[in-house]
Each structure stands twice: as structure tokens, then as C-alpha cells.
Amino acid sequence: MSKQKEYPNHPVIVIGGGLAGLSLALHLADRGIKVTILAKTELGEGSTRYAQGGIAAVLTEEDSFQSHISDTHIAGAGLCQDEAVEFVIRHAPDSIKWLIDRGVSFSLSDELGENEYHLTQEGGHSHRRIIHAADATGEAVERTLEQIVRRHPKITLLENHIAIDLITSHKLGKPGDNRVLGVYVHDIEGNRTVTLPCQHMVLATGGASKVYLYTSNPDTSTGDGIAMAWRAGCRVANMEFVQFHPTCLYHPHAKSFLISEAVRGEGGKLLLADGTRFMTKYDERAELAPRDIVARTIDFEMKRGGHDCVFLDISHKPAEFIHKHFPTISARCLEFGLDMTKQPVPVVPAAHYTCGGVITDLKGQSDISNLYAVGETSYTGLHGANRLASNSLLECLVFAQSAAGQIAERISEFENIPPLPGWDESQVTDPDERIVVSHNWDELRRCMWDYVGIVRTDKRLARALNRILLLKDEIREFYSNFRISNDLIELRNLVQVAELTVRCAMMRKESRGLHTTRDYPESDESTPALESILTPDSSLV
């Protein structure tokens, strides 16, 4: 193996360019610490950009921290960790102020005084506490922070660079605690692989919903950080809790465009094809029930009646109201010939959010020294068995700040990085048939959708695991013998995340939150919050 000297030692490497990664980088850079951000596509193409609804925070006297805490625990079906919930929600107002101070333009209220923000209500919330930028909050936040990042003198941005694997002291045979030392990275445009040493590393790669055939997420959501951390020796927890967003646009060319939770929060009703409203039969909160309940109900009604979709109707509201509150959604629907001011919109559930991930503490610290995970990549204990709407961007903000604080305190502890081995391609050749990758990609995602979806059984999970292990062997062989590509890197990560999801689901012998199984239809209150912890060993990695 050759040594690569083209990249110097990096104080901090952040892998991922969404809200978690950008805000953490800015917190460090504003303290004078040099940060390198790796983005596997152009910056801003991750899930943050597509977050429509907003950010949950207690911002009025009518609301309270205790109410937000209670709503989070209820949505999490009793599996949220008290300390994490309290920590995030009490830091929420300061996080919103931080965004406002950096120029994010949240929507103002028509009814309240000047400079008073409009707050909406979403499923599972007992108050209006969702601050938003119309129906494109994620895009507004991402765009604002991206502009600051691109001109910040302390931040180096490497776009179109996809991380392959972490380099740790244990992988190099070093004694003592396992410590992250660097990362192998594939430069997509340069078609080369480089070695980046670092003192501290942050995984902010987002979730893994691309493991399913139908998802609201962009193509970048391939579980890269979770898979890399697992292979490096980190524990992973609660991967069975995959949130399916109840209302994605049903159209052959829409690519599962999300219809925000806020549409139901502002009075949207769910209907069958004949116009019958059905949510009132299943939950007293009706359309404002938490997402897991709404998604399961839609799934049940579709299967019971043989329907391809259900319909979301807000046409009873004035057209001016709809265009003002949902300009992005209404415009997108019109592109497909759907006028939401005059007709119901066809919707279906789709994989949306990964509630499990890399286990961290309240500083974002993982099991490996100086390796942090923030945002959807992590398991912090905030979400439990189901994420409360608009708590996701909030989690990114709060943990980015807390992780940055710890990194800043420890930045000088490990200044000397030992020489790292370069990437070895001496035993591989160019792939002879790339179609193997695309076929395995499709088979994996269909398998997960069919067997590890909204409703599961032991038999379905066993079938899924059997197929996933066969695919994993095929992908490992391909990866070992041929030069890598970004598609192969993502497929390798996806099949690992798929296995972790199934193994976690097999461990939980109850139905709770986002995990519903016909073999164990009741919740078991004696089951601990972290029933489904996976620890790496040679048989699984």
C-alpha cells in the first residue's frame, strides 16, 4: 500500500452537507477551527432541502416545554429517553434564534403583530409550535447556511466526494481505545480514491430510506454513515423503526413528492376514492394522529379495498390560503394536472425517516473516540418508536451545537496522526458487467418493501434476511474484485443497513410505534427502550 501525501491532516472532517453537517461546521468555524465538509453530490442535495413542514419549538407563552416533551414521548410510544427529550426541547428556542440570526426567513403571521412568526400545527402536537418558511422550510434553511459555508474562510468544501470506509486505530492494529484516524474517500469527478487523515470526524450523512422501493427521500439517503460506523465498530440501535410518511404524491412521474404534514395540520382531510373520510374511525385525533397511526391506517384501507391510493383534500379552504401556505406543493401538483384548490390529491405512504442509527451520547459521541454522529445518522433517544413531526431538523440543530462544543474543547488532544495506508487497488480490475450492481440495487429495495414494510411478520422477516445475506455475499465479492464506483459504494452500504434493519426487527417481539408485526400485535411494556441493540462482531460485519 502506498502513502498519499496530497491531503494534509484535517482538524475536523464532516461527512454530509445537510442541516446537521452545515450547522456543526459553522459552529466550529465561527470559533476559528478549520473544518472540511465532504458532500457526495453538489452541496444541498440531501434530505434537508426537501423538508417541507418546519421545525418544532416552544415559541409562545401559550405553549410549554412540558407539553412539547409530553407530545414527543406520546409519539415515541414510550421508548424515548427522558434525558434526550428534555435536552433537545429545552434547547430548541435557542436553535431557532441561531437560524434567524443567520438570515433564515421564516414565515410571518398575518394575524399577529409585526415580526411575529406564523406557527402551524402538525400531527401529534398539542399546540401550534412549528416555525416554517412557507412549505419549503428545509430549502430555505439549507440555502441560507450553504451561502455562509461557501464563503467562510475556515471551511473547505469537497463536493462530489463519497466516503468509503473509516480508518481507525483498531483497524491498523494499534493498542488502546479505538480511535478514528481518517477516511478513504472516492473523488467521483476525478475518478480516484484518496486518504484523508483527521483528528475528529462527524458523520452527518442522513438516513437510509433509499433502502425501500418507495421513499420520499432523495437518492443520497443510502445509510452511508450508519454502515461505515457499524463496520468500524460502533453499536447501532432501533433500526426497525422506519417512519413511513403517510402522504406522498401518487403519480407515475412524481417520484414520491412529499405532501407536507402541515396540509393536514391546516385542515386537510383523508378520503377514500368515493369521498368517504376514514381517519375518524381509527383515532380520535383523526388526521392529526401521529404518522405511524396515519400510515398504518392508509395502508390498511388500501389493502382492504384494493385501492392504489387514498386522497388528501384541502379544497374546502380558500384558494388564496392554499397558495400562500403551500406554494411549492400546489405548484408541483399543478405540474401533474392536479389543482389542490379544487380537488383532492392522490397520496400513498412512502419510507421517510430512519429513527434508529449509530448510538451516541448527548454530545454526539459514538463508541469510537473522536467519531461523532449527528442528525438522522444517529440514535440519540429522542425519537423512540416514532418521530414526532418536525422534531428532525430540531435534532440536527441541537446536537450539531453540542457536538461542536465538545470537539472545540478536545481539538488539540490528538494533533499527531500516524501515517495512514493509502487505498490499495493492486488486486482489482475494471468491472466486466455493471448490470450486476443495478440488478442487486433493485432486488434489495423490492425485498425490503415487500417483506420489511409498514406491517411485518416473522416469516416475512426471515425471507428478507435470507435474500439480503445472499445479496450481501454477491456485493462483497463484486466489491473485492472490481474498482469501486459511487453506485457500488452506496449499494454496499444499503445492503448492510437492510441487514441491520431486519435483525433489529427480529429482536423486537412486540408491536410498537413504527414496528408493527402480526405475530406480536400487542405492545409489551416490559420491553426496554433499547431492546434492539446490535454490536458488531466478525459474523455480522
Image (spheres, rainbow, N blue to C red):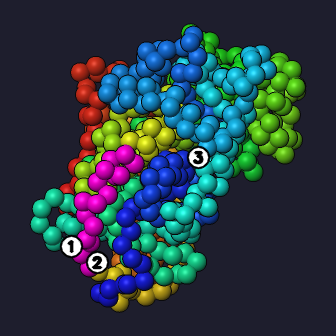
Residue range corresponding to the magenta coloring: 403-420
Between 147 and 429, which is closer to the camera in this rendering? 147
Mark 1 neighbour class, 10 Å CA radius: few under 14, some 14 to 19, many 20 or more: few
The quarter of the picture where the C terminus appears is bottom left
**476 left or right of 130 in image:** left
Taking 474 as reference, is 65 above or below it?
above
The disc label shown at residue 420, or none: 2
For the residues labelled 2 and 1, say whether their Cβ atoms are less than 8 Å apart.
Answer: yes
Q: Quadrant of residue 251?
A: top right
- What secondary structure is marked by label 1? loop
Tag 1 residue: 172
- Identity of the amino acid at label 2? Leu
Can you give x and y, in whole percent of width and height, for residue 391 in the image? 51, 32
- Residue identified by numbered label 3: 48
Which residue is drawn at the image coordinates 55% and 81% (left, top)? 190
Number of other residues with Cα within 10 Å of mark 2, as a class: few under 14, some 14 to 19, many 20 or more:
many
Left or right: 38 as drawn, with respect to 313 = left
The first of marks 2 and 1 along the sequence is 1
Q: Residue at x 54, y 56 (%)?
A: 17
Q: Quadrant of residue 267?
A: top right
Q: Reply yes or no: does residue 29 show up in magenta.
A: no
Say if residue 1 shows up in the picture: yes
Describe the element under mark 2 as helix, strand or loop: loop
208 left or right of 184 in image: right
Label 2, label 1: how far apart the Cα atoms are: 9 Å
* 292 shown above or below 441: above
Label 3 crowd (10 A; few <14 / some 14-19 / many >=20): many
Disc 2, disc 3: CB below 8 Å?
Answer: no
C-alpha span from label 3 to label 1: 35 Å
The image quarter containing residue 531 is top left
